[in-house]
Image (cartoon, coloured by chain):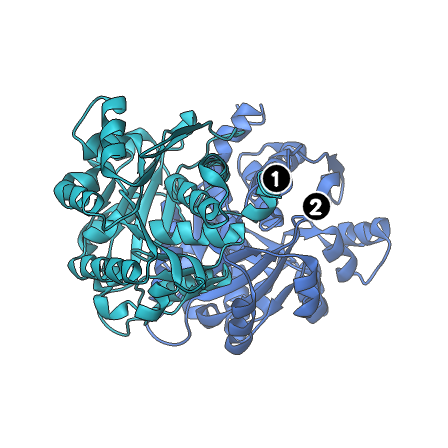
Chain colours: A cyan, B blue
Amino acid sequence: MTTAKYDVLGIGNAILDILARTDDGFLTAQGMAKGSMSLIDEARAKAIYDAMGPATECSGGSAANTIVGVASFGGRAAYVGKVKNDQIGDFYAHDIRAANVTFTTPIATDGPATACSYILVTPDGERTMNTYLGAAQNLSPADIDETQIADAAVTYLEGYLWDPKDAKEAFVKASKIAHGAKRQVALTLSDAFCIGRYRSEFLDLIRGGTVDIVFANEAELLSLYESNDFDAALKQLRSDAKLAAVTRSEKGCIVVDKATVTEVAASPIKELVDTTGAGDLFAAGFLYGLAINAGHKRAGELGCLAAAEVIQHIGARPQGSLNALAKQKGLLG
Amino acid sequence: MTTAKYDVLGIGNAILDILARTDDGFLTAQGMAKGSMSLIDEARAKAIYDAMGPATECSGGSAANTIVGVASFGGRAAYVGKVKNDQIGDFYAHDIRAANVTFTTPIATDGPATACSYILVTPDGERTMNTYLGAAQNLSPADIDETQIADAAVTYLEGYLWDPKDAKEAFVKASKIAHGAKRQVALTLSDAFCIGRYRSEFLDLIRGGTVDIVFANEAELLSLYESNDFDAALKQLRSDAKLAAVTRSEKGCIVVDKATVTEVAASPIKELVDTTGAGDLFAAGFLYGLAINAGHKRAGELGCLAAAEVIQHIGARPQGSLNALAKQKGLLG
């Protein structure tokens, strides 16, 4: 096995976030389940957009947010995702490249528009996402560059990829290439509702060794094992997964492997503004910590620090250098 | 004169802001004059965008920001500006309508793309703008709806409109309609560099009574009279204008007419993040104060409050209700 060119390569749905503040009444009136991610078609996208307030646009997409976070820590990062050559796609490609991420996925010249997620942020900071997948649905196995995957120490995949059929195949192809090159594969379970759609497939991926590292939050862990008992579900996850990090909002995170359980406290915040990207940025810090062999505790701390940064402002990507922030907090030398 | 349907109608260049944080070295390397607004062509826009960091997109445009601010205070507001039917134009039209602003200007179906301003925000919170006018250049006298202008108590115009030739004619047409209907016309001088391009024309507008209310900041006032002496320039402005409000950043503002001089202290802030929109939002509060006959002092206070809100976050439009904020501060009953 040669030295990896990238610390982490992420594959995901490339989505521009359209964020607006709202109140709980709007979610109720629109029949939205608070905190969830719903897939919507173009007509529903238009209806939601017409009803929602003035917005701000930022590049998003779960795995992309993670990869930008890895780069912000100073990691070598690459991203695979599908946009179209429209104005939104231009924003997207600019933002990820400007974040020092290698992004070479061919850009679609026809078909649906670049994906958008209409994100409603309530006063409690919780985000409710409505995603029109558009061009992201057309990510296909042909977009997976074998050399690039083999060059990444970790290939990071989002559970959301299980929604578009071709993307799922791209996911599986990438996993095989990564393992063929003796690299690792990480998976985020993405969303409790997403797990509801694909529970048995996700369990097969974890139990069958298609993925080596699993990221989940509490709700996702409970959904995965259809349990109400956190400790029992965590025990099952330890039995099924090689390594997992479970995030618990203000309670920090727990990192588990077959031999160890490591609890890490949350990073303090001044004000919770918008939880969009919290899990994504946790994964960024954790994966960067693994890349520099910092150990589970420090990796968890870096994850919590990055999550704390991103929830204190609107949008799912860090607003400053996470490397500088981590140095300031004494987490990086 | 019938009762006005709108408190304020604004006419301006409709522009999507593309905001990125940077440092002073970037401005120097790009040959940008800090704090200025430069007009750029498509090629220069591409070069700047390629060089700048990850960005956030928000609807902007000087007069539009003001009008959205008026609506946020609870004023009845309308906007006239030109976008194209592209993705950026869709964002723009959505955002202004979602802010409760009447926006009925015909949307271009061909010609250049919707305008974008590439805005670099330095660590001191100062913004440096590079504007590709695109579709905004094609605002023409035909876009001025006589009934709508006659229905507005104040028609508010941005000095930037003097850049595109047809927009200038639209400006003059609107002023004539407004005065024909016994309404008032307000002008913001926009930018010291803009004044450098059109000084004698702006002075003619003020001295000839084409505009009734003038907004300027210190630099613009000094540029208008090619002076280094604030007091002398202010004296000249009092002699030339019927009513003027001059903003002085952390020193607040001075409101002058032929008979009175009213000084208003700045509104306190916790942290200066991004000055984009400061002058625009001052004008919003001031015009809303005039609309409710609050007097010069209170109008100035409302202006300072709105400016303070907008400089504490990224983007040029208020993030919450200015009416609620003003009530909380005891400035509105």
Q: CA distance from mark 1 to mark 2?
A: 9 Å
Quadrant in which residue A229 is drawn: top left
Q: Residue at x 69, y 59 (%)?
A: B24
What residue is drawn where x is 23% and y is 48%? Answer: A209
Q: Tag 1, which secondary structure?
A: helix
Q: Residue at x 30, y 50 (%)?
A: A117
Q: Could you tell me if the residues under marks 1 and 2 are in contact, i.e. CB atoms within 8 Å?
A: yes
Q: Position of residue A230 (x, y in %)?
A: 26, 24
Say which chain tag 1 marks.
Answer: B
Crowd band around label 2 with a 10 angstrom C-alpha radius: few (<14), some (14–19), many (20+): many
Element assignment for label 2? strand
Looking at the image, how many numbered discs can be counted on the residues? 2
In the figure, residue B144 lies in which quadrant? bottom left
Q: Where residue B213 sits: x, y (%)?
A: 64, 50
Residue B247, numbered circle: 2
Q: Where in the figure is residue A89, as x and y percent of width and height?
A: 36, 65
Residue B314 appears at what percent x and percent y?
Answer: 54, 47
Kind of residue sitting beneath label 2 = Thr
Residue found 18% across the figure and 47% down from its top:
A208
Q: Which residue is mark 1?
A: B303
Q: Amino acid at mark 1?
A: Gly
Q: Is residue B292 above or below residue A17?
A: above
Q: Is residue A278 left or right of residue B298?
A: left
Left or right placement of residue A333 versus residue A288 in this view: right
Chain hosting mark 2: B
